[in-house]
């Protein structure tokens, strides 16, 4: 009889959890304490499923879940919570879990009363591309209205011998500068639909051949070493049509422009400019490769804990930002960690400096995720 009781107990004992379990009843079950899986609009759904697939009921029963809706909490204008109906064998009635896909908790746990069959295994999410695109557009409108921004050389040595390109940031900045010059500045938070389309403009200059007259380009294309070449948007532009693409920019007579539906060339892309046969000796085309360098942090001191914060804690706050052409952090957004430390973290990051990423020697705006580690 004793052996039977021990065997029965073994089958009814709760299994060990492969992840930490929260001791807070409100965690996951209230809008004020959602599960923070992060990832932004592009990745939140897959990250929510990965979290839920790891969960089990208290006795190890698999969890079934169904998305039931989305709502926007009052704490900020960006976050949207997703709600899921959760069930498992033996549960009297479904439970509702809330998920925040716009912030990430480095110490994700199972809700109280649940276990994990496997580790949750969600690492910090990558850059939220949709947020980065919106932030880049707003920054381009603001900075473009305030100052002229030089184009990017098509030549890796920075000489611009074959022409220049305007990445999406510069295209928007040019439009903003032109609008400001006419007394009708663009509202950074209400950009015209035309500026919502991601695109870049490549301007090919006439080829110079010693004492001969310059030879105007005949075509521009992007050769992709990997993947599909980006689509050209519209016809080649010259004269007044080119001037409308890059307002306020002086280009040499005979220049030609093409618009492509990407933010900027990829590192493996080659820009090919074709010239008429015999126009400049045997050479009828120029193949221009792209030279990229990544952004590099220069001075990033970690801030002390604000007064009143427990000294035995060394928290981390996660932010997403843009490193602008000057190497400073702009468009800083909270994506993880205690909101109580947000002001201190943003204040610290605004003082950080970096060497901006560069394309053919010209600085480019790039999105980054940042970790602010507070010291005692």
Image: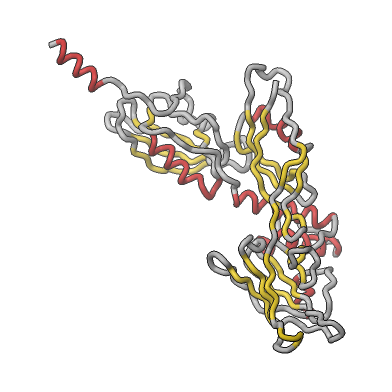
Q: Looking at this rendering, what residue extends furthest in the left direction?
A: 1
Q: Looking at this rendering, what residue extends furthest in the bottom direction?
A: 278
Q: Looking at this rendering, what residue extends furthest in the top direction?
A: 2
Query: Can you say whether 2 is above or below 35 in the image?
Result: above
Q: Looking at this rendering, what residue extends furthest in the front direction?
A: 282
**Percent x, y of residue 349:** 74, 37
Q: Nearer the viewer, residue 61 or 209?
A: 209
Query: Can you say whether 17 is above or below 232 in the image?
Result: above
Q: How many marks?
A: 0
Residue at x 64%, y 32% (from the top left corner)? 317
Q: Quadrant of the N terminus?
A: top left
Q: Is residue 317 left or right of residue 248?
A: left
**Percent x, y of residue 60:** 31, 29
Q: Is residue 200 left or right of residue 3?
A: right
Res. 344 image quadrant: top right
Residue at x 78%, y 84% (from the top left corner)? 215
Res. 243 image quadrant: bottom right
Q: Nearer the viewer, residue 315 or 171?
A: 315
Q: Report the colour scheme.
A: secondary structure
Query: Can you say whether 249 is above or below 239 in the image?
Result: above
Residue at x 62%, y 66% (from the top left corner)? 269
Q: Is residue 234 left or right of residue 160?
A: left
**Percent x, y of residue 322:** 70, 47
Query: Can you say whether 367 is above or below 1 in the image?
Result: below
Q: Nearer the viewer, residue 271 or 29?
A: 271
Q: Nearer the viewer, residue 283 or 266?
A: 283
**Percent x, y of residue 64:** 34, 38
Residue at x 63%, y 20% (from the top left corner)? 313
């Amino acid at each position: 009889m004793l052996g039977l009781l021990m065997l029965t107990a073994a089958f009814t004992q709760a299994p060990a959890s492969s992840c930490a379990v929260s001791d807070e009843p409100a965690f996951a079950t209230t809008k004020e304490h959602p599960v923070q899986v992060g990832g932004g609009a592009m990745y939140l759904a897959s990250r929510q499923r990965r979290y839920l697939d790891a969960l089990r009921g208290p006795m190890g029963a698999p969890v079934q879940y169904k998305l039931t809706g989305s709502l926007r909490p009052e704490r900020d204008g960006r976050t949207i919570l997703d709600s899921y109906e959760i069930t498992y064998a033996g549960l009297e009635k479904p439970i509702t879990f809330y998920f925040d896909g716009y912030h990430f908790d480095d110490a994700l746990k199972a809700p109280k009363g649940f276990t994990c069959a496997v580790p949750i295994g969600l690492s910090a999410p990558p850059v939220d591309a949709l947020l980065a695109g919106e932030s880049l557009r707003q920054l381009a409108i603001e900075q473009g209205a305030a100052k002229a921004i030089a184009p990017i050389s098509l030549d890796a040595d920075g000489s611009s011998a074959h022409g220049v390109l305007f990445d999406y940031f510069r295209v928007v900045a040019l439009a903003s500068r032109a609008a400001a010059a006419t007394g009708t500045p663009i509202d950074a938070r209400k950009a015209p639909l035309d500026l919502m389309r991601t695109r870049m403009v490549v301007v090919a200059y006439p080829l110079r051949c010693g004492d001969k007259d310059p030879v105007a380009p005949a075509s521009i294309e992007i050769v992709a070493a990997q993947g599909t070449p980006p689509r050209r948007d519209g016809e080649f532009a010259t004269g007044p049509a080119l001037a409308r693409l890059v307002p306020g920019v002086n280009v040499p007579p005979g220049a030609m422009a093409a618009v492509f539906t990407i933010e900027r060339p990829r590192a493996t892309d080659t820009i090919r400019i074709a010239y008429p046969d015999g126009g400049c000796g045997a050479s009828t085309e120029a193949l221009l490769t792209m030279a990229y360098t990544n952004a590099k942090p220069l001075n990033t001191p970690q801030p002390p804990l604000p007064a009143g914060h427990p000294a035995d804690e060394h928290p981390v706050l996660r932010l997403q930002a843009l490193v602008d052409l000057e190497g400073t952090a702009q468009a800083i957004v909270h994506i993880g960690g205690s909101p109580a430390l947000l002001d201190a973290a943003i204040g610290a990051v605004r003082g950080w400096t970096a060497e901006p990423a560069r394309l053919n020697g010209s600085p480019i705006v790039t999105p980054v995720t940042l970790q602010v580690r507070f010291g005692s």
